[in-house]
Amino acid sequence: RGLESDSNLFREPSALCCALSATMYGQQGDPRMMGGASAFDPARYCIPGEITVHEVMDMKRAFDMIDEDGSGLIDAEELQGAAVALGIPMEENITVLLGNDKIGFEE
């Protein structure tokens, strides 16, 4: 099943982050997720029997790749760049969905 066939990607921008995580399996971790006082804790996002630590880490890596400025938030421009990179034609849909809002990993 291709990413283009998943209509949820067009309705939920955060689903794009999940889709991108599938392309990242096996890559090295991002420094923003390791060490220091503000280290990322994947356990708080796990749901037993549904979402594993490994899956959360994959989603966080994908999120951090999309978050080009390292702000911890994804804006419409960054999400549009990810959609283009994945070959998903979303054009103005992202701006309509997000407006001037930004998406944090928690969302």
Image (spheres, rainbow, N blue to C red):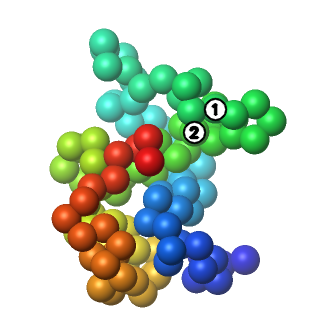
Decide if residue 64 is on the left or right side of residue 73. right
* Secondary structure found at label 2: helix
Which quadrant of the figure has residue 5? bottom right
Residue 92 position, x and y percent, is 30, 85
Residue 89 position, x and y percent, is 42, 87
Label 2, on which residue?
56
Residue 94 to residue 46: above or below: below
Residue 68 position, x and y percent, is 24, 54
Q: CA distance from mark 1 to mark 2?
A: 7 Å
At 64% across and 32% down in the image, what residue appears? Answer: 46
Label 1, on which residue?
46
**Type of amino acid at the residue the image marks with label 2:** Val
Pointer 2 local density, CA inside 10 Å: few below 14, some 14–19, many at least 20: many
Farthest residue, direction top: 37
- The answer to whether any part of residue 11 appears in the image is yes
Decide if residue 93 is on the left or right side of residue 76. right
At 58% across and 24% down in the image, what residue appears? Answer: 43
Q: Quadrant of the N terminus?
A: bottom right
Of circles 1 and 2, the one toward us is: 1
* Secondary structure found at label 1: loop
All told, the count of numbered labels is 2
Decide if residue 71 is on the left or right side of residue 3. left
**Type of amino acid at the residue the image marks with label 1:** Cys
Pointer 1 local density, CA inside 10 Å: few below 14, some 14–19, many at least 20: some
At 55% across and 25% down in the image, what residue appears? Answer: 44
